[in-house]
Image (tube, grey):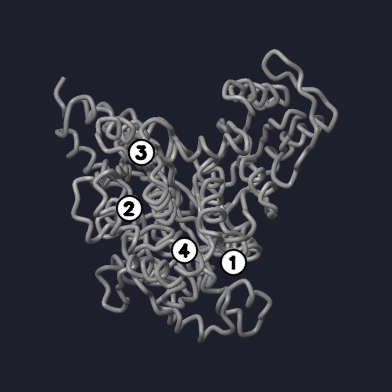
Amino acid sequence: MSQLVKFKELYRKCNIGREHSACDYFALIRELVSLRKAEGKQWQRYIDQVYGLIMDEIICNAGTPVAVVKFGTSGWRGIIGKDLFVRSVSYVTAAIVELYIAVDKEPEFTGFLGVKSLAEARTRGCVLGFDNRFGGEILAGAVTEVLRSAGFVVHYAGESTTGVLSAAVLELNAAFSINLTPSHNPLEYAGFKYNAADAGPAAAELTNQITRRAQEIIGSEGSPLVSFDRPVLSAADRDDVQPFDALESWKQLVRRNKKIHDVDYDRVMADFDEDNEVVVVIDSVHGTSRIHIPSLFEGVATERLIQLRDTSDVTFNGIAPEPSSENMAGVTRTLRDRSESLKLGAIIDPDGDRIRFTDGEVEISMNQFGAMAYHFLHEVKGKKGMVAKTVATSNLANRLADVLGEETFEPRVGFKEFKPVIGQALVCFEESDGITIIGHTPEKDAYIGLLLALDMVISRRQNLGEYLEEIEKEYGAYYPDRDGLSVSLQGGELSEALSRLEKYRVGEEVAVGGTRQRIAEVVDIDGRKMIFEDGSWLMIRPSGTEPKVRFYVESRTESGTVALVEAARAMLDEIGLL
């Protein structure tokens, strides 16, 4: 069968026709990516043709998003062309502009926004960027059109990462940032992140208002702040934006706050350049970090810095572009083939707010690395202060803080929940591979995690796995894991179904593996976390960004996590969600 005939068959199978709304473009993209993997690059031209149709949908879609606009724990996410397109993104931007217009008359949100007047917000302006997702530039152009029409300065970063844009807000003293990214979601997703003047994920008080007003604007099919009278230009093609180097802003922030966190960017890079025993392998999974890594390691002229998947590919070659054990395989293989004694490997998600590590032998997720970072800053750097971790994260950090005589701040899932302790906690981290440190941004940032890990390896002359083993020998070993499943229920229906987990109270016994475990404590600030008498636990909560239920577990033995995952699945089955 010829390529063209096969393409036409797939075209019909995915219902591609005249009306964009009925076309499943990304089902076709996935089929074509599979063929590209199996048969070669000749299929790329057909992939490009389909993306041409998607671009037409992004620009011309005059309808409403398929899914209702809603800001979750980290912004608004949806399908490219179906949920996020020029019109819908323009309306959401208008909802944000309205927050600032209202400041002069309704100052109740002033503290959350970090500005005192509309004039101040306009002058300080917006930091604008996007990740490598398809259509990012044109969607950024739609955002720019609304902002410039409303009189806001636009600091245009182009393709950049979440952590870098957050740093730019602080260094430029901008009023807010907009980053068009769905983080680690699959190839069909786009997203919209909004951070206020503190440069951290926006407070619920703001995102609730944005959600409400965006839904009203979309429902009424218009806003006086939005006009579609002229073609939308990509932000890069406009002459009324202020382009700047966002990564340089990130470097300036790290250097400026060196005395606070004692992570010396220039010294670490110089030491790496001169140390022939250290090799670093970084997998960007085709995401935005691919363009930053060479500049991040500027001046490091060495073959001991190796980049994997450092080419642009909006399909991510068909994988879910997240830090995971499966995706880490290439980094592990590369490190194992190297002769250097000190090995650091990392995988970074598309918008650079998540990172996971390996030394070629031991994989280290943020559950462990966050605790290691706290130990490093507290015991090696001599910094004193609490640790902050989300409730779904390993209790290893709790144990460290307890022994060190420090507090643990443990909020619900979502990086915005760390706001009360920014500037106090030495480390803030979450189970999904996000981290920041004192003196840095209040946003999760893969690059500060990478710099910290490299500092650990070079200064301690240890691989991360050896450092972790040393900590576990002193404070005890913890074995976390997580999983999730897609569900048909959403919103109130899902919450009602999950409320049936309340039957699992303190004192109840749960079958875990071949034993019965008694519940010693229940934490219900975010879903339901059941802690057993032996210190192991499992937690079940709905996802804030996807139609999924997530469950998190932690065992005190290496073999015990599988049984806890099965116990969590059994609970979900019992309440009718499997």
Give the Cα separation between the discs numbered 2 and 1: 28 Å
Q: Report the residue at 83% width, 26% height from top.
A: 508
Q: Is residue 241 visible?
A: yes
Which secondary structure, mark 4? loop
Which secondary structure, mark 3? helix
The circle on residue 262 is 4
Give the Cα separation between the discs numbered 3 and 4: 46 Å
Which label's residue is closer to the chain start, 1 or 3?
Answer: 3
Give the Cα separation between the discs numbered 4 and 1: 14 Å
Question: Which residue is disc 2 drawn over?
Answer: 288
Question: Which residue is disc 1 drawn over?
Answer: 423
In this view, the mark in front (2 or 1): 1
- Give percent across and percent down for residue 363: 44, 34
Which label's residue is closer to the chain start, 3 or 4?
Answer: 3
- Give percent across and percent down for residue 33: 27, 33
Q: Report the residue at 51% width, 70% height from top.
A: 223
Q: Amino acid at mark 4?
A: Asp
- Give percent across and percent down for residue 533: 77, 29
In this view, the mark in front (4 or 1): 4
Question: Which residue is disc 3 drawn over?
Answer: 26
Callout 4 touching callout 2 (CB < 8 Å)? no
Please tell me how crowded label 3 is: few (under 14), some (14-19), or many (20+) other residues with Cα within 10 Å.
Answer: many
Residue toward you, 541 or 212: 541
Q: Report the residue at 26% width, 32% height from top.
A: 32
